[in-house]
Amino acid sequence: MNKRSDHEFIATMSLAVGLALAGCAGEAPPPETAPRTAATPTATPAPSGPAPGAAAATDRAAGQFARMDRDADASVTADEHEADALAMFATMDADGDGNVTAAEMDASQQALDGDARMTSAEKIAVIDGDGDGVLSATEHAAGASAMFVRMDTDHDNLLSAAELEAGHDAILGAEAPPVDELP
């Protein structure tokens, strides 16, 4: 790979992992409380508005943005993003060995208000630079940094709530390509 491809690869991987880590835990839908009855066949209008789960993803992104925006100025700086990534890694690294396994990431998802659009193993694979299936602190930090750069679409060195949400959706909203197919 050339130097630019390496940076693009790291940025893509970082975005995926950061997004994955920022939203690793999906919530189960509430149990059905009303009994089912036989329905009379009728025409069903096409759904309008956001896809199912979109509101939850938007709420999750808003909560993550509020957590990262430590000075409450309606933007997230690279330093705020880095601090959140460090805290996230510390939460996931349950045994304190400086590495996060898929099992550790799975176990931390509720505490991190994670996003279940990708499995923990898939999220790790996106930025697992050495391909060992484990996320090191260095890989996570590089991924978070590259993710910030990729999400900052207006290049003002700040993330807006819209940039953060769009960045998460870009990676988690669709099936992630295999690592060897990323630019």
Image (cartoon, grey):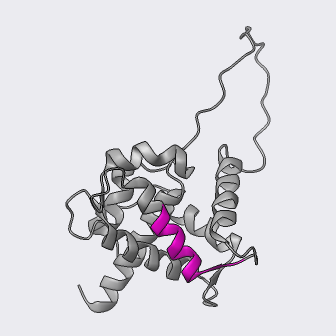
Q: Magenta stretch: give its range.
A: 75-87
The C terminus: image quadrant: bottom left
Residue at (32, 56) in percent of width and height: 96
Q: Position of residue 168 (x, y in %)?
A: 56, 63
Kindly indicate the quadrant of the structure image that contains residue 64: bottom right
Q: Nearer the viewer, residue 179 or 90?
A: 90
Residue at (74, 8) in percent of width and height: 37
Residue at (65, 54) in percent of width and height: 60
The N terminus: image quadrant: bottom left
In this image, 125 relative to 145: left or right? left
In this image, 167 relative to 52: left or right? left
Q: Position of residue 126 (x, y in %)?
A: 35, 64
Kindly indicate the quadrant of the structure image that contains residue 47: top right
| Residue 114 seen | no
What type of secondary structure mainly makes up the magenta span? Answer: helix
Q: Position of residue 155 (x, y in %)?
A: 60, 90
Does the magenta segment cover residue 51? Answer: no
In the displayed structure, 45 sits above or below 36; it is below
Q: Position of residue 103 (x, y in %)?
A: 33, 44
Does the magenta segment cover residue 80? Answer: yes
Q: Nearer the viewer, residue 89 or 58?
A: 89
